[in-house]
């Protein structure tokens, strides 16, 4: 399942101090009606929250890190779920020793400073629906 897209515009900006990373990015994408694209972020957080998908139980388990962390990398894609733009993003955090932790970006990741680039694509957006094999809301069409 492959679709072809073209780069329409690039949105670049700074995230508010104290904002929730995934919620703020989702707000920006919804306000600008971006339905397909790529998101990248670097910066730092005061708290990081990731999810890990348990493939046997088919459920997400959350883990929060209440500490200052660098956003070494955060990359995500934009598609539609239930008619609304949804960002699926993964994140790597670095601690003061330079050690990395990471996973699926969850709510509860609080921005200290954040710089984002959103590449907006033109083309037919992917839509998410429940995949019976994995239990995940994967791209269907
Ligand atoms: Zn994920």
Image (cartoon, helix red, strand yellow):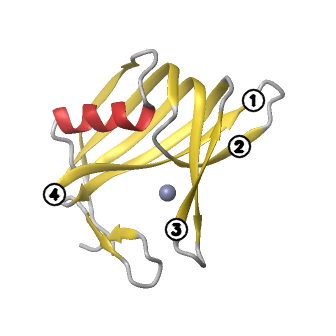
Residue 98 position within the rendered picture, expressed as x and y whole percent measured from the top left? 80, 30
Going from N to C along the chain, the mark reached first, 3 or 1, is 3
Q: Residues within 10 Å of mark 3 (few under 14, many from 20)?
A: some
Q: Which mark is residue 95?
A: 1
The residue at the point 33 percent across, 74 percent down is: 130
Q: Viewed as shown, does residue 67 lie left or right of 128?
A: right
**Residue position marked by numbered label 4 in the rendering:** 83
**Residue position marked by numbered label 2 in the rendering:** 101
Residue furthest to the right in view is 97
Going from N to C along the chain, the mark reached first, 2 or 4, is 4
**At numbered mark 4, what does the secondary structure look like: helix, strand or loop?**
loop
Foreground residue, 97 or 51? Answer: 51
Q: Viewed as shown, does residue 55 lie left or right of 124?
A: right
- How many angstroms separate mark 2 from mark 1 (CA)? 8 Å
Are dots 2 and 1 in contact, CB under 8 Å?
Answer: yes
The residue at the point 28 percent across, 55 percent down is: 79
**At numbered mark 3, what does the secondary structure look like: helix, strand or loop?**
strand
Which one is in front in this view, the residue at disc 3 or the one at disc 1? 3
Q: Is residue 137 above or below residue 133?
A: above
**Residue position marked by numbered label 3 in the rendering:** 59
**At numbered mark 1, what does the secondary structure look like: helix, strand or loop?**
loop
Going from N to C along the chain, the mark reached first, 3 or 2, is 3
- How many angstroms separate mark 4 from mark 1 (CA)? 37 Å
The residue at the point 57 percent across, 41 percent down is: 49
Quadrant (top left, top right, bottom left, bottom right) of the N terminus: bottom left
Residue 128 position within the rendered picture, expressed as x and y whole percent measured from the top left? 28, 66
Which one is in front in this view, the residue at disc 3 or the one at disc 4? 3
The residue at the point 39 percent across, 18 percent down is: 14
């Amino acid at each position: 399942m492959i679709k072809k897209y073209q780069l329409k515009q690039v949105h670049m900006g700074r995230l508010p101090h104290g904002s929730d990373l995934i919620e703020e990015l989702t707000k920006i994408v919804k306000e600008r009606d971006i339905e397909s694209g790529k998101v990248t972020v670097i910066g730092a957080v005061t708290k990081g929250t990731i999810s890990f998908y348990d493939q046997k139980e088919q459920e997400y388990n959350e883990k929060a890190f209440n500490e200052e962390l660098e956003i070494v990398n955060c990359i995500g894609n934009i598609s539609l779920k239930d008619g609304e733009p949804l960002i699926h993003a993964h994140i790597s955090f670095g601690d003061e020793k330079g050690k990395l932790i990471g996973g699926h970006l969850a709510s509860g990741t609080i921005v200290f400073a954040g710089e984002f680039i959103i590449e907006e694509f033109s083309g037919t957006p992917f839509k998410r629906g429940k995949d019976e094999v994995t239990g995940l809301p994967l791209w269907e069409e």
